[in-house]
Image (cartoon, coloured by chain):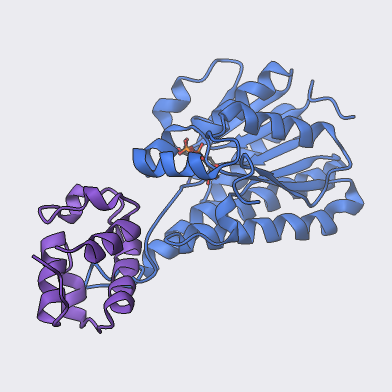
Chain colours: A blue, B purple
Amino acid sequence: MLEIKNKVAVVTGGASGLGLAIAQGLVKEGASVVVLDLDRNKLDLLPDEIEKYCIDITNYELVQQTVDSIVSKFSKIDILVNNAGVIYSESFINIMNPSCMKHSYDRFKKNLDINLNSVFIMSSIIAEKMVINRTQGVIINMSSISAQGNAGQTAYSAAKAAVEAMTKTWSKELGVFGIRSVAIAPGFINTESTNHALNEKTIKHIKSNTPLKRLGETLNIFQSVKYIVENDFVNGAVLQVDGGLTI
Amino acid sequence: MNDKVKEVLAEVFDMKSSEITVGLTKDDIDTWDSLRQMDLVTSLEKEFDIRLEMMEIVSLDSVAKTVEILKSKGVDVGD
Ligand SMILES: NC(=O)c1ccc[n+]([C@@H]2O[C@H](COP(=O)([O-])OP(=O)(O)OC[C@H]3O[C@@H](n4cnc5c(N)ncnc54)[C@H](O)[C@@H]3O)[C@@H](O)[C@H]2O)c1
């Protein structure tokens, strides 16, 4: 079993929601935690023991500079949690909007930028450090049950499915270095973003379709991260944390 | 509006038949989004054996408008 204590963890999007719970949980377990997030106001609310960088993780050069400075400060990165993402819905064909029924291509590309390309950028830059330093680290990617295809979420579903494919690819490719790659596919978790994206009626409907009859809590996602880090034979898996919704 | 029309709308919007009244617009129905609009169109076409034109599809924005379009297609929608 691997101990979280004394590990160095980078959590993207750690200023709110699931990322915040993960960052706080890792700190409690004794890790040194670095959060990368766009939202300066929310970053300012994080406790002092968390190292914070206000950056857009879709910017390759900025991520490279930031990772370089994290490694020069902490000398290694053991855990990368690619959590930042934006839940996004848009119909592929919207018959209620006759002037433009098609899904915007610009918004499709923009969404892939944050939900997919950022995961590539973060992981390639940090995996290189892990390989050079011979750190037997772990890359944890936040997917979603939408990776299986969700009506009204072309861009988001495509991005998350690709994130799962990258997770499996890296698990095979980086395994020889002892670097693991695992994804978590949460169902509906009780976060601000869920409550913002869905109305009350939809949330009620989701709960009634979930065998456990409730939404998940952010702690459930941190518990998955802890399990993945500690169990060093878990590699290439996609952990469904959805109360049984997708069974 | 007869029971059949109410049942189709209720099924599409996840509501009870008794909740469907002629005064409702899409703004009153939380579940009436662009995905349900497709559902609405295909359900109406199937149940009443009609074909909706694009202009009719985009103008479906209330129960009253739905009833009016069905009527114009010769569907018996009741009183
Ligand atoms: N909440 C859920 O129920 C749920 C379900 C399935 C999957 N997820 C996934 O979990 C992850 C976190 O979701 P959440 O609900 O906590 O969202 P959230 O909006 O609360 O948090 C996301 C964080 O990412 C940051 N961020 C966004 N774009 C960024 C960028 N370009 N650079 C740096 N930071 C950026 C935001 O500022 C925010 O703090 C996402 O990947 C989401 O797709 C969430």
Q: Is residue A54 above or below residue B61?
A: above
Q: Is residue B62 among the parts visible in the rendering?
A: no
Position of residue A72 measured from the top left corner of the image (x, y, whole percent):
71, 32
Q: Residue at x 61, y 16 (%)?
A: A49
Q: Is residue A146 rendered to the left or right of residue A232?
A: left
Q: Is residue A26 above or below residue A193?
A: above
Q: Residue at x 83, y 46 (%)?
A: A179
Q: Is residue A13 above or below residue A117?
A: above
Q: Is residue A240 above or below residue A102?
A: above
When asked about the image quadrant of residue A101, the answer is bottom left
- Which residue is more in the foreground, A119 or A57? A119
Q: Is residue B56 rendered to the left or right of residue A25?
A: left
- Which residue is more in the foreground, A116 or A123? A116
- Which residue is more in the foreground, A180 or B64? B64
Q: Residue at x 30, y 49 (%)?
A: B16
> Could you tell me which quadrant the N terminus of chain A lies in?
top right
Q: Is residue A87 among the parts visible in the rendering?
A: yes
- Which residue is more in the foreground, A34 or B78? B78
Position of residue A200 measured from the top left corner of the image (x, y, whole percent):
35, 38
Position of residue A77 measured from the top left corner of the image (x, y, whole percent):
74, 35
Q: Is residue A27 rendered to the left or right of residue A134?
A: left
